Amino acid sequence: MTENKNLKKTFKILSNKYVICTLVFILFFIIIDNNGFMTYYRLRNQNKILTEQKEKLEEDILIDSVNYEKMTHDPAEIERFGRENYFMKRDNEEIFIVKRDK
């Protein structure tokens, strides 16, 4: 009998129009709204990924700028770069290219 009364009391509270409107508003705000929590977490994760990419690219820029400075002032560095990346060689040399599978 007490369970039945508790169930009726709970149903009466949940069927109240103000409770229903509040629940609908909360669900709308969490799931459907463009500025809701779901969008917030998605954008936060995307921001984290982009920040990591930015840090990696800044490191690459620093490495490339150091290499550029070396190559602009040292002819031996230009020769080393050409030999390593473009397989250039001197007249009395032979080049063996070893390809590795990744």
Image: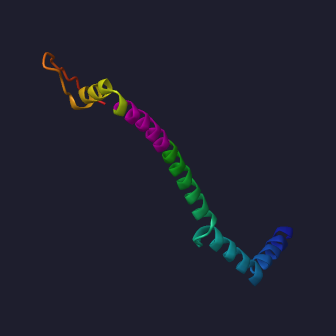
State the residue in front, 26 or 75: 75
In the rendered image, the vertical position of residue 86 relative to residue 97, given as above or below: below
State the residue in front, 81 or 98: 81
Which residue is depicted at the point 40% across and 34% down?
A: 69
Which residue is depicted at the point 22% across and 23% down?
A: 98
State the residue in front, 79 or 34: 79
x, y percent for residue 68: 38, 36
Image position of 24 (left or right of 48): right
x, y percent for residue 3: 82, 68
Which residue is depicted at the point 68% across and 76% down?
A: 25
Q: Residue furthest right?
A: 2
Asked if residue 68 is among those painted magenta in the image, a careful observer would answer yes
Q: Residue furthest top?
A: 92
Image position of 18 (left or right of 93): right
Q: Is residue 100 visible?
A: no
In magenta, the rendered stretch is 56-71
